[in-house]
Amino acid sequence: MNPQAIKVACSNCNLRELCMPMGLTDQDMNRLDDLVAVRRKIKRGDTLFTNGEKFTSLYAIRTGFFKTCLATEDGRDQVTGFQMAGEIIGLDGIVNDQHTCDAVALEDAEVCVMPFDRIEEISREVTALQHHVHKIMSREIVREHGVMLLLGSMRAEERLAAFLLNLVQRLHARGFSQSELVLRMTREEIGSYLGLKLETVSRTFSKFVEDGTVEVKQRHVRILDTDGLQRLVNNQNNHCH
Amino acid sequence: MNPQAIKVACSNCNLRELCMPMGLTDQDMNRLDDLVAVRRKIKRGDTLFTNGEKFTSLYAIRTGFFKTCLATEDGRDQVTGFQMAGEIIGLDGIVNDQHTCDAVALEDAEVCVMPFDRIEEISREVTALQHHVHKIMSREIVREHGVMLLLGSMRAEERLAAFLLNLVQRLHARGFSQSELVLRMTREEIGSYLGLKLETVSRTFSKFVEDGTVEVKQRHVRILDTDGLQRLVNNQNNHCH
DNA sequence: CGACACCTTGAAGAGGTTCAAGAAATGTGG
DNA sequence: CCACATTTCTTGAACCTCTTCAAGGTGTCG
């Protein structure tokens, strides 16, 4: 309720390449510095926005880790994604001027608040930003196609393998290890995202450990055989015809 | 390869309310008439675009019915959506300037070709269009969240019930019956979309017929108990705790 | 009319879920 | 800082839903 009013500029931000368009003129860059109204800190377990809340802004994650989830009255619950630094969150709210899911911080986090009317205004003047906004939304659509493929056609091992590879790849793009990662979410949250029960996630981790594909110590995961995981995802055992 | 060069105007189109923003001034409406380059006819079974093809345009469906599907080299195949008149197709291509799925006509169809650079250009001048484009993309993101919920947490009956209700609701919005519909797709395509095998789809239809919830005669479906289907989707039997 | 695609149904089997119990980690308050 | 409560994770066993394989039926189109 009391957003930290730190005046900030994208032009100085080390995450610029992740959330902003590239190759801008100085002039355009200056325009873009008006995009971020304020930054806001969210404590672990708190929500950035919730289902039904009025939509006003998109958020660029500066630090921390989020999940977005749908919770219906009748008790269904679905994690629709995990988001990390440099990613944009809140796109679901545009269509009906209200958010349709909850965004929960899985660790203490900070986001840049970008009022959407300001985004639209500046988009009209800076075509690079306009194009960037379109790409970000399209990317989200394509990502979700991938999740549909996963949920619709993969078995448990394949899902978890795809999940781990995706996470580690995104972390690597942010300068972290290619093979080691710390899960910010519980087995239950992984399961919800992958359409599996938490026990199945746990068992599948154990199977990977037995096979020597990964090492797992609670939330610390080290991938020993990236290719093996990739082969799983690419179906090189099943569907023999 | 030889698109019919019929000069057309959105201002006269009876689907305007479905694919265009509302409440425009005459002046803005005139600008919008430049959006559609040409119309294009696609025969049943043919593709509007395919995975890997260069992205140039979005398409507004005028008549006909499409599926979009992902096919990976390794033999997985996932229908990611079914699209009907008034809906916009091709958003997946924006992010990398190439399409990432196939759009296949399930019946003879006609689409309005809207070059994307022209959309962006006019968006900068007509804010109603800008806003509209954002809403369409956001709507697609929200739709896909719903599919993730379906694939991640519903059982076969619930999935098929949700599918039928969604189809009939969209058809009703286009002036068709609230209770009768003709499926444009095979059981296998329904199954692919719902993450089920075609046999399961068939059996589930049979179960609905036994229960007196629907009548099915091949692809002709009449819904006898909409509330019953809705109750299934809203899980009023399971999760007793 | 015949070939082909599509649909239905049965029976057996596999993969994932459910229920249950216990272990390990984490957080809290005295 | 330790003890206790709580959350999270692991593992086993029984069960259930959906899949797989198979066969036959129905509809459609050249």
Image (cartoon, coloured by chain):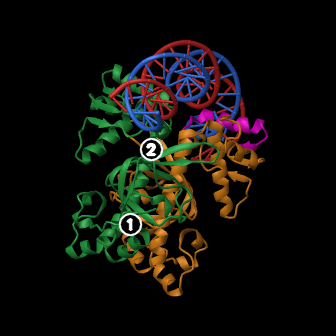
Chain colours: A green, B orange, C blue, D red
Residue type marked 1: Met
Question: How far across and how far down the image is residue A115, in percent?
Answer: 41, 69
Question: How far across and how far down the image is residue B221, in percent?
Answer: 71, 47
Determine which residue is flagged by label 1.
A114
| SS label for mark 2 | helix
Q: Chain of mark 1?
A: A
Query: What's the mark number on residue A78?
Result: none
Asked if one can make out residue B234 in the rendered structure from this viewpoint, the answer is yes
Question: How far across and how far down the image is residue B83, in percent?
Answer: 55, 56
* Residue A170 in the figure: left or right of residue D22: left
Q: CA distance from mark 2 to mark 1?
A: 27 Å
Residue located at (29% from left, 71% from top): A32
Residue located at (73% from left, 53% from top): B180
Residue type marked 2: Val
Q: Tell me if residue B210 is in the magenta stretch.
A: yes
Do the residues marked 2 and 1 share a common chain?
yes
Residue located at (58% from left, 63% from top): B85
B98 vs C30: above or below: below
Determine which residue is flagged by label 2.
A147
| SS label for mark 1 | strand
Q: Quadrant of residue B214?
A: top right
Q: Which residues are magenta?
A: B193-217
* Residue B134 in the figure: left or right of residue A212: right
Q: In the orientation shown, which residue stands out farthest toward the bottom? A: B27
Q: Quadrant of the C terminus of chain A?
A: top left
Q: Identify which residue, A233 or B218, lies in the foreground.
A: A233
A181 vs B30: above or below: above
Earlier residue among tags 2 and 1: 1
A141 vs B7: above or below: above
